[in-house]
């Protein structure tokens, strides 16, 4: 069947009269656009990434990290030995020792000095007993760790030699959304791989590094896959603008979202690790709410309406709302107040928490900054002296276990059986140092440090490092002597002259994990 279309008497007929000249309006006349939106021909030329790629592949290295086999204590069957008596088991506390298999990880790194200093991610080399670095020309070197910063997921390693190729470090703050970049690394163990994309966003936060982590990522759609970690994000001028760190994907492979640590954050942290052995991290001393994130994550319409009403009362559309001032922190010694909204730090606008983290990460304790806040719908600029996590401006040193003045070993199996314990660290010698000041004697067996069980020397060292960076700077140790007598010690790790104390009794101390934590 063929559909027939006919005209009716009421159908509109063509009008032979022409449209009045005044009615011939154009799109541009009706819709007025901002002149700033026009792009000149000078900046629309094709982008050439070949020179940047050629420079970058020689400065990006392949890193192979190996963790040796070791004996660890693990949880036994889920019934904790409940049926051991029935089936001839050994009984006990549901824990057993086992030897782990060697573990090998791969990643990338960037040579930043001609004498062999390399920046990479902390997670690429964390826990490694051996590090092998391979250059683009297939030369291979043994690497050693100079320093690490878990909070920002950065590490500085060193290889021996001179005249290595390097990448110039650029200004990540100058990056613009939409700007072309390349990601250079070793995905899936494929060396010297270059992918291209654009800067998709800046100052992204993912929650990857926890509440104390430093996150202000550059987001890019340049393909980043497993093995790219620690590699370079490079602009068209061949400058290092980021260290590739995170891949967000439900499959574990690239789906268009990769994240890099900005070079301006990296420069300050890596310099600290080289000069001081530890990051000199400035803390603002506040608890804050990122207003854009809070709006996006509001539980329901009622919560969103309440937040937006408060923002209207404060006279802001974004920023970081101060919900608490930490006692003894930087903010407590300034004119900052609760319900102030931070909208700037020096010359950097602050729209959300990631902006604040990124800006603050470039400063050290002892420096003075200017914080711009909105208070009572009026802008106010407040000068503030930055302090560290301990609430002072002293240099944080990574002095290692040497300051304890003691030697340690993991408790031998025979001694464990004799004392009825399954783990612990034995003090095998005490000389002048923090341990002697606290009254610790040779033969003391450390069972717990700051409420956490200690199964190995590496766990003890991790507990020590955490304690040196805490506000208290104290090692609370619970343990026993070979006689069976239990004893607890508090070892003062600060630079002050306060000696540690001990408490000899028949019971262990309580868990000290829940002490106040200053952000």
Image (tube, helix red, strand yellow):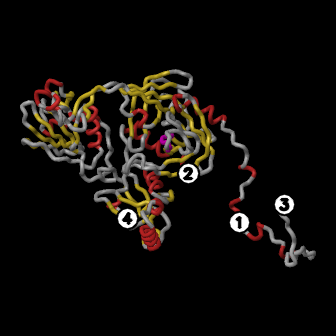
**Nearer the N terminus, badge 2 or badge 4?**
2
Q: Choose mark 3 or mark 2, whichever is in front.
A: 3
Q: Residues within 10 Å of mark 2 (few under 14, many from 20)?
A: some
Between 33 and 300, the one nearer to me in the picture: 300
The numbered dot on residue 33 is 1
Closer to the camera in the image, 161 or 209: 209
Residue at 59% x, 51% y: name it: 177
- Does 450 sit left or right of 222 as displayed? left
Q: Which residue is mark 3?
A: 2
| Sequence-wise first label, 2 or 1 | 1
Quarter that holds the N terminus: bottom right
Q: Residue at x 36, y 66 (%)?
A: 337
**Which residue is nearer to you in this view: 502 or 12?**
12
Location of residue 215 in the rendering, given as x and y in whole percent from the top left corner: 44, 49
Residue, far front? 1
Under circle 1, the secondary element is: loop
**Which circle, 1 or 3, is nearer the viewer?**
3
SS class of the residue under badge 2? Answer: strand
> Magenta region: which residues?
243-249
**Front of the two marks 1 and 4:** 1
Magenta region, mostly helix, strand or loop?
A: strand
Per the image, label 4 sits on a secondary structure element best described as loop
Q: Which mark is residue 201?
A: 2
Mark 1, residues whose alpha carbon is within 10 Å: few (<14), some, or many (≥20)?
A: few
Residue 221 rendering spot, x and y as whole percentages: 58, 44
Report the disc number at residue 336.
Answer: 4
Q: Please, which residue is most extreme toward the right here?
A: 16
């Amino acid at each position: 069947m063929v559909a027939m279309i006919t005209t009716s008497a009421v159908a509109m007929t063509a009008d032979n009269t022409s449209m009045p000249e005044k009615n011939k309006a154009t799109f541009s006349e009706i819709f007025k656009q901002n002149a700033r939106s026009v792009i000149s021909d000078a900046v629309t030329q094709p982008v050439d990434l070949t020179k940047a790629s050629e420079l970058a592949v020689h400065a990006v290295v392949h890193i192979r990290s190996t963790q040796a086999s070791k004996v660890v204590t693990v949880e036994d069957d889920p019934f904790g030995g409940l049926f051991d008596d029935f089936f001839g088991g050994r009984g006990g506390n549901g824990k057993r020792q086992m030897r782990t298999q060697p573990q090998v990880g791969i990643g990338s790194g960037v040579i930043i000095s001609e004498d062999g200093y390399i920046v990479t991610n902390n997670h690429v080399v964390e826990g490694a007993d051996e590090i092998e670095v391979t250059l683009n020309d297939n030369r291979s070197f043994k690497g050693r760790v100079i320093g690490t910063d878990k909070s920002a997921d950065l590490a500085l390693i060193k290889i021996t030699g001179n005249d290595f190729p390097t990448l110039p470090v650029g200004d990540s703050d100058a990056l613009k959304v939409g700007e072309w970049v390349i990601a250079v690394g070793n995905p899936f163990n494929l060396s010297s791989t270059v992918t291209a994309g654009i800067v998709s966003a800046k100052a992204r936060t993912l929650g990857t590094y926890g509440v104390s982590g430093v996150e202000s990522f550059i987001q890019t759609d340049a393909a980043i896959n497993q093995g790219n970690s620690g590699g370079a994000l490079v602009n068209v001028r061949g400058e290092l603008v980021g260290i590739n760190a995170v891949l967000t994907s439900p499959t574990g492979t690239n789906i268009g979202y990769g994240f890099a640590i900005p070079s301006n954050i990296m420069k300050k942290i890596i310099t600290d690790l080289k000069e001081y052995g530890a990051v000199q991290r400035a803390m603002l001393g506040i608890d804050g709410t990122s207003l854009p994130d809070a709006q996006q994550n509001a539980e329901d319409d009622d919560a969103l309406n309440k937040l937006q009403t408060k923002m209207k009362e404060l006279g802001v559309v974004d920023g970081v709302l101060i919900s608490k001032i930490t006692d003894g922190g930087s903010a407590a010694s300034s004119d900052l107040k609760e319900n102030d909204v931070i909208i700037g730090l020096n010359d950097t606008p602050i729209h959300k928490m990631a902006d604040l983290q990124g800006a603050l990460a470039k400063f050290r304790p002892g420096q003075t900054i200017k914080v711009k806040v909105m208070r009572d719908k009026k802008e106010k600029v407040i000068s503030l002296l930055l302090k560290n996590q301990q609430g002072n401006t002293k240099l944080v040193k990574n002095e290692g276990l040497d300051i304890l003045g003691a030697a340690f070993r993991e408790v031998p199996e025979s001694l464990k059986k004799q004392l009825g314990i399954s783990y612990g660290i034995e003090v095998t010698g005490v000389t002048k140092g923090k341990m002697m000041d606290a009254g610790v004697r040779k033969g003391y067996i450390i069972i717990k440090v700051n409420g956490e069980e200690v199964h190995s020397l590496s766990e003890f060292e991790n507990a020590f490092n955490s304690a040196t960076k805490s506000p208290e700077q104290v090692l609370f140790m619970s343990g026993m002597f070979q006689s069976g007598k239990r004893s607890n010690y508090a070892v003062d790790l600060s630079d002050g002259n306060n000696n540690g104390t001990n408490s000899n009794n028949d019971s262990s101390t309580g868990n000290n994990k829940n002490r106040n934590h200053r952000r």
